[in-house]
Structure formats: C-alpha cells, structure tokens
Image (cartoon, grey):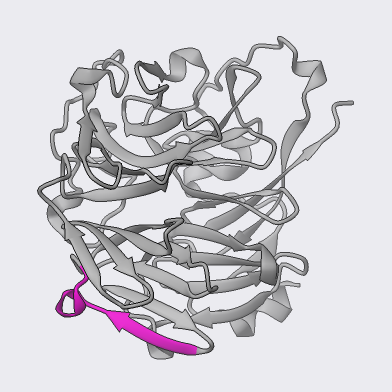
Amino acid sequence: MIKNLLPLLVPALLVACSDQTDSTATAAQEKPHVQLSTTKASALPIYRMVDSFEVGENVYVRSLKAEPSQNAMWVGTSVGVLEVDMKSLLPKQTFTRESGLANEYVFAIGIDQKGAKWFGTNAGGMSRYQDGQWRTYFPMHGLADYWVYSFANHPDGGLWIGTWAGANRLDLKTGEFTTYVKELINEWVYAIQIDSKGYVWFGTEGGISLFDGQTWKSWTHTDGLGALNGNQLPVSTNTGLGTRKRHDLGVLNDGSPTYNPNYVFSIVVDPEDIIWAGTWGGGVSRFDGKNWTSYTTAQGLPGNIIYSMIRDSQGVLWVGTENGIGHFRDGRWEAFADNYRLIGENVYTLAESSSGEIWAGTRGKVIRISSAATP
C-alpha cells in the first residue's frame, strides 16, 4: 500500500503505517498515564487505534470532515487538502494552491447542504469547491478576514463562518455576507455550533457568545467557563494566536503550557442542547443553560488544553488535547488507552467516519480508532 500511495501525494504523503511513532510520541511515552477507573468498564467497548497514516514529519493535520454520502474523509493540512476514500483508505484527490485552493494551510473544512466543500485557510481567505470548480473569497467579497477557522450550517440555509475578525453569515442563495464583530465577546472566532432551536454558539479567544437570531449573550470565566488554574500555569491573556503568522498551536510560552480559560477553541452541542466547551488550560466546561461544570485532568481528562471535540453517533464525547485523546461516557472521563505509545501529544482535530471510527489529526499523522468488544 505504501508504494501505491507515494506517487499520489507530494508533498503531503498519506502512507498507511500500522505501528508508526513520531518524535512527539516518543517523548510522550515517558509521561505518566492518567489512571482510569475500572467502574463499569467490563460493560463498555474498548477503543484501540487500528492504524495511522503519515502525512509528513512537519505537516500538521488541522481539520477533518466526513462526507458519508461520498464515503470520503476530507483532510486539511498545513500543505493542502486530501480527499480519502473511507473504505479503501486510498487518496481520491489532492488539492494545493496550484489546484485552486486559496492557501495550502487549511484550518477548517465545511460541507454545505448542497454538497459544496468550503475550506478556511490561514491568511488565504476561503475557498469553495463545487462540481469540480473552485471559487475563492477574500474580504473584498465580504468575508470578514483572511484567517478562517470554522464553519457551521444553519437550518435556514445560511453558512456561518468563524474568522479572526468576527463571524460571517453567508446567504448561499444570494451570496450576501453579513458580518458580526462588536456583538461578539471577542472577534477571534474559532468554533461555531448550532443548537436545536437554531441558536448560534461561538467559541472565541475571549469567551462564548450566543446569537438567538435577535439578541446576543456571552459568558466568560467569571460566569463559570473554564476550570480554576489548579496547576498554577502561567496566565496568558493572549495565547499568541493573534500574531497573524503561521503558528504551531502546541508550542506557546516557549513550549510550556499556559492558562486562558476564556479561550474556547472547540464547542459541541448535544441533543439536549447541553453545551460542551473546550478551553485553553481550563479543561472542558459543560453548560446546561444555567450552570457551568468544568472537568480537568483531576476528573480523568488526559490534558487541560482542548483543541478539538466531537460527539459520535453512540453519544460518546471525544476530545483532542495537548496530551492525547480522551472520551466521556457513562458519566466519566477516560484517557484513550493508546495515547502515548502511538499517537503523541497534540491532537488538533477529530471526526467520525461513516463506519463509526474516530479519525484524529496530529502533527505528521491521521489516526484511525475503532471499538472492539471487551474480552
């Protein structure tokens, strides 16, 4: 399989490799594992890494988006985009700037109701790929900024876009952009989710904002967002992401972890409209509409910096942290068993495949995780 893939993916090589490790994984092996409770464990499936795919030692996988109707997984990296067949695990297409992509560094991937693919890039604006044709959007077209970090489809047919200069709503019928900046708690928007009522939730570098279609509301650490700084980490009021240059989200403050509980990089809305927010150093916070509850390594999370979160089809909440992958099920957090030996540290993005597997993006790799019955 390796030989078949090499000619197709240059410079971003997607190579199947079942037991590969990288330098971050090797270093992480020495870290102590989170001690897992065995309560109810016998009744739950065990998750294991089934294989991984290399994309290049210094290539970062920043976004993953499943397209079940096409049996495809879209992989956004720091050197371009890959479309991978989820059955054969072979690449179907590779896109770079030469193909029509606005910029190779892709931080966000969205698929709208008509099947068009949207790619948010680092300093290159936003590109749409539809029916084999590309179109790129810049601020001159109405996009809020050249840095684009998230997408969300609204039931009304609009596409919401998170940027470093506020949020856009794009009317897909008219092509009209509406921009929101002052309404938000902070203009650096990294995550957008829509709840069952059509309310729009925004994760920003300064807290969480909510737009119900008419009014705005926001929450910060003062309101309960993010756990207390139990490890006494250096407090960062600006994580360094505002430098507007290519950045490694895993290396801040000279490589040491920092703490900013207002900085929300990921949001999940569950079927009961419970909000789950991943913070920078403050772990995961759960909001039931009235109260915030926060979870950290003290409750079983592998790390307190939460880059990514998804809720899978079985109701399991998955998080990607600076210290591997964790999941929440049956009311408790667990660190993924294969974290340190095979995955490494920083897990930037997560997605669920059409077969129920969890795909995870790190530096140099895409990881595939599957469940197996407990022996």
Is-magenta flag for residue 80?
no
Q: Residue at x 58, y 56 (%)?
A: 366
Query: Which residue appears farthest toward the front when viewing the image?
Result: 214
Q: In this view, does 214 lie above or below 147?
A: above
Q: Which residue is drawn at 40% across and 70% down?
A: 119
Is-magenta flag for residue 138?
yes
Q: What stretch is highlighted in magenta?
A: 133-143
Q: Quadrant of the N terminus?
A: bottom right
Q: Quadrant of the C terminus?
A: top right
Q: Residue at x 75, y 17 (%)?
A: 41
**Residue 271 or residue 368, whichever sits in front:** 271
What percent of the width, then of the height, locates residue 294?
39, 18
Q: In which quarter of the image is residue 263?
A: top left
Q: In this view, does 141 lie above or below 270?
A: below
Name the side, left or right, on which 195 lies relative to 22: left
Q: Quadrant of residue 219?
A: top left
Figure label count: 0
What percent of the width, then of the height, locates residue 58?
42, 62
What percent of the width, then of the height, locates residue 15?
64, 68
What percent of the width, then of the height, locates residue 307?
40, 42
Q: Residue at x 49, y 75 (%)?
A: 116
Name the side, left or right, on which 237 lies relative to 189: left
Query: Which residue appears farthest toward the right when viewing the image?
Result: 375
Q: In the rendered image, is residue 96 in sight?
A: yes
Q: In the rendered image, is residue 12 in sight?
A: no
Name the side, left or right, on which 134 lies relative to 204: right
Q: Is residue 222 above or below residue 350?
A: above
